[in-house]
Image (tube, helix red, strand yellow):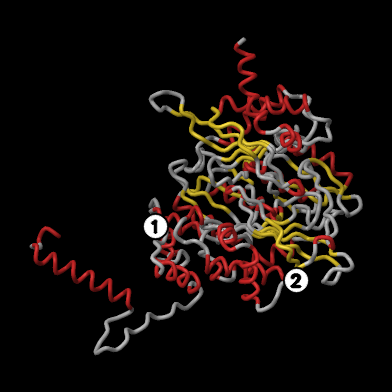
Amino acid sequence: MADDFDAEQKRYLEGFAHGITAVRMTGGLGTGGAAPAPAPEPTGPDAPHIKAQDKLVKAGAKLSDQEKWKRAENPFDGHNRLIAEAEAGKTPKPEDNFRWRYHGLFWVAPAQTSYMCRLRIPNGILQHWQFAGIADLADAHGGGYAHVTTRANLQVREIAPEHGQPFLDGLVDLGLTARGAGADNIRNVTGSPTAGIDAQELLDTRPLARSWHNWILNDRSLYGLPRKFNVAFDGGGVLPVLEETNDIGFQAVEVTEGASVEPGIWMRLVLGGITGHRDIARDTGVVLRPKECNAVADAILRVFIENGDRTNRNKARMKYVLDAWGFDKYLAAVEEKLGRKLERVDPAHIKPRGGFDRYAHVGVHRQKQAGLNWIGVVLPVGKMTTDQMRALAAIARECGDGLIRLTVWQNFLFSGVPDAHVAEVEARVAALGLTTRASSIRAGLVACTGNRGCKFAASDTKGHALMIADYIEARVKELDVPVNLHLTGCHHSCAQHYIGDIGLIGAKVVVSEEGDTVEGYDIVVGGGFGEAARIGTEIWKAVRAEDCPGRVELLLRDYLAHRTGPQESFQAFTSRRGPEALKELAESRMLEAAE
């Protein structure tokens, strides 16, 4: 239609459009010298986010596409439209794909032309009947399987568009939800997997995780953050929850006599963990009573809402506000929100934390309740069929306390298993093709979805993880200590490759002068968690996937040959050996093979 206007008419329309833009920018037309009317102040639960966006635009910044999409139509307000489109089998546009994630549904094309649903399971613990119910939903609406995630959560894949809402309705019937499980929101709340059954723990994290979960669900102003956000509660038990990889970590600690606060069990506050960006949460020096966690986390989030970057998605996490401001300024802003000072305790008055058992998520372990045990089941990179899920639910009901405890290691625990039923549980698990016993490599194997189900991934992480495990088990039988191997498909680092003993991140490897590529990985070593928290160091870049099992074997054989003894961990060995020596391993072995 633009061709129907002559040049003069086009200039008039351009001028009119510029005038409208000016009116919008100034808040109205001035008349008779009067000041322009101010724009109305945003109200409602979305107001903090709109104000943060306005502040950036006024300063001359350009909002990211995701911020524009949130502003054009709040994902919760668009829910009924999205349902109608899904029922018609319509493929969502990019902006609607983003909005659907507020409801837990992710359109994962081109990897799969379907939705993936990510749930919310606070502290990763659910009842056996809920677990079996999810299996039924996966059969009715999905692909007949589920994955345990690295946030002690569940994902169901291959959900056709018209099945999206029925699947979500089914979750509600089970007392579960997927609300806010994706996009710019607070992700699943993690807590100690052995909460309430661990003799070493200082505090049961289940009430704290559920309380924070409900706090989030019932406050819409906590949705639509500058980017995603992770919160974890560690109770001080033998099995870590990897709270140092979270934006906010609450760690149960015992404060001793002589401190500036009353002695007893407090929660230490750590901030800024984001391993995909090579950072681990740092101690703030702040301690708080367990009942204060919600209010403090809320204040931390509101400072982030107001000051997080909404223009550059790569810099939109809380870590970057902390980097720019420093911890003191950020905590001062939190205290202003709270209207009070936070308590701080000298580390000298905090009792050292009990040690970790890196294998506590696998096998049989005594609970603090006499005569009872928890039993960790190894899953092949987190995957279970629905038939396995229903059978596992039956085992929990008939041989344990009826709970399924998911872990950040992509497996789960039975709990409350009497001594007399341990052998039965192990046998029934084995009959399902699973195991409660694992090699040192397979029990520490973690892999993200990979390119079979995620468009961002450069490699088939789950497939390659199992390939490496099979290769190592057949060749390095003398491995006698835990070694964690993490494979992630892209820079989002969902499998947290930087904290693995050996971490692999997907990469396209150029294999010809014409630029042909194959799947492969960059390889890092020396990462860790808990008392040995550390970001790994890259030693090899662009290794073909088919060559990765051999590279892992080189590292493990070098470790076994040169460690000071079994007491020296793989992480300690790689730190002592140094990255340059490890880099030279591949070259020297290839020369030996050539000769």
Q: Earlier in the sequence, mark 1 or mark 2?
A: 1
Please tell me whether residue 196 is drawn above or below residue 430 in the rendered image.
below
The reply to whether residue 103 is visible in this rendering is no
**Number of marks:** 2
Say what secondary structure mark 1 lies in: helix
The amino acid type, in three-letter code, at marker 2 is: Glu
The reply to whether residue 578 is visible in this rendering is yes
The amino acid type, in three-letter code, at marker 1 is: Glu
Q: Nearer the viewer, residue 98 or 354?
A: 354
Residue in view at x 10 percent, y 67 percent: 9
Say what secondary structure mark 2 lies in: strand
Query: Residue 507: image x %, image y %?
Result: 51, 35
Using a 10 Å C-alpha cutoff, classify the residue at mark 1 as few (fewer than 14 neighbours), some (14 to 19) or many (20 or more).
some
Q: Is residue 280 left or right of residue 226?
A: right
The C terminus lies in quadrant: top right
Q: Nearer the viewer, residue 86 or 238?
A: 238
